[in-house]
Amino acid sequence: MDIFHLFLIAFSLILVIFIFVMINQIKKLKRKNLVIQSIKKISDKLPEMGHRMDFIKLIGSTLKEITHSKEFVYFSYNEKMKILVPIYAESPYAKQILEIRLKIGEGFTGKVARERKPGILNFANEKKGSIHIPGTPHEKNSLLAIPMIFNGSLLGVILQVKYGNKIFNEEDLALSKIFVNTVASFLYTKNLLYGMRNSVVQLIISFVKNVEYRDAYTAGHSIRVGHFAEIIARGMGLMEREILIAKIGGFLHDIGKIAVEDKILKEKSPLDDEDWIKIKTHPEVGAEMISKFEFLKEVVPCIWFHHKHYDGFGYPSYPVKGKDIPICGRIVAVADAIDAITTTRPGHPARSLSQAFEELIRNSGSQFDPEVVEAAIKNKKEIERYVRKEFDVEDEENYRDFEKIL
Ligand SMILES: [Fe+2]
Ligand SMILES: [Fe+2]
């Protein structure tokens, strides 16, 4: 082989290596660019993203794009209890994952939280001390965990999972870290907002409880109406958000009764005209109260129009009828009527669900929206589960769905 051929081979080799290095560099640059784009996307979307959970979901989907991980769990750090609580999991086993609680230092994720340093644990299932979540399959998996820290405080830990022979590398860790560190301040703001909204919701729930306790006949009424409204809204094929609003609207529909005096609320015999005038203010009072809170604004029409008739009669006197009455108001009106008819009230004993439906059909098109009535009747079985069901008004479980609106 002459010198020319040797030179040609050497040159080709260098060229191949050069191309290989360049391809790798381009790939790295592409991933870095993806991180920058993702941060930009998140900061652009931030003003319109009112809910903390939406934000966490976006973090998860972005990280999955960056590292090609399969699953994502966000553990929120509970400072008081010194535990990690998973509040969002993108996994087929989300239900099981959301039940676990990790002490600081426990398992790989707990250690990352204690040391406040990101880490990789490839083939975690083969490592000593790895935690297997009951109800999930024993699979070959690799983990990448990043602590989310802002202003020196641990907010939580983000865990990503890959399966089989797919593992995490240092680049996955570095890029995830850049991304997580940047969005930590956004999440911190969201957490503050969440805390404030949660205090408002706790106060509102205490008003609902107050009404429930003072009303001689209606203990558990608001909670049952919430369930009926949810079933009807789902039966009508509404979107998940509208279903949630209908349910919360059901919970809160009578909140304006907080302003109605005891004497009227506790009255067991039919009310006189003067008392009726007072009690008829409760939809407007309640709507006015709730309208003060921006994050609950979608619930306002459910409260405002729950005594408004489909034909425009009923109260308040606000001139609106038919499909112009917001859907949530039309749904809560039917849900409220079902509970009123099936429980003992001043002037009438409790009647059966079938009798309630007869009443709804009789007033369909006049008092009630025929479409809503139809959805209620079609879902009789589900509604039946809650008819006259007693609820412990104090039980926090009953108000769980408020979480979703924060
Ligand atoms: Fe009412
Ligand atoms: Fe009611």
Image: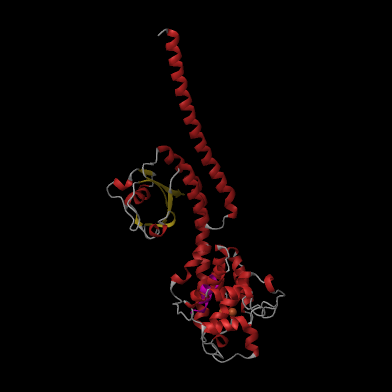
Residue 286 seen from this side: no
Q: How is the image coloured?
A: secondary structure
Q: Give the quarter of the figure containing the N terminus.
A: top left
Tally the marks: 0
Q: Residue at x 27, y 47 (%)?
A: 128
Q: Position of residue 270 (x, y in %)?
A: 59, 91
Magenta stretch, main secondary structure class: helix
> Which residue appears farthest toward the left when viewing the image?
128
Q: Is residue 222 magenta?
A: yes
**Which quadrant of the view contains residue 296?**
bottom right
Query: Does residue 15 appear to the left or right of 129 in the view shown?
Result: right
Query: Does residue 251 appear to the left or right of 275 in the view shown?
Result: left
Residue 136 seen from this side: yes
> Which residue appears farthest toward the top when viewing the image?
2
Q: Position of residue 239 (x, y in %)?
A: 57, 63
**Which quadrant of the view contains residue 247?**
bottom right
Query: Does residue 198 appear to the left or right of 132 in the view shown?
Result: right
User: In the displayed structure, would residue 167 be above or below residue 96?
Assistant: above
Q: Is residue 168 magenta?
A: no
Q: Position of residue 375 (x, y in %)?
A: 57, 73
In front: 334, or 152? 334
Q: Position of residue 213 (x, y in %)?
A: 49, 81
User: In the displayed structure, would residue 384 be above or below residue 406?
Assistant: below
> Which residue appears farthest toward the front when viewing the image?
378
Q: Which residues fall within the magenta stretch?
A: 220-230
Q: Residue at x 53, y 67 (%)?
A: 200
In front: 391, or 8? 8
In front: 158, or 135? 135
**Which quadrant of the view contains residue 37?**
top right
In front: 81, or 243? 243
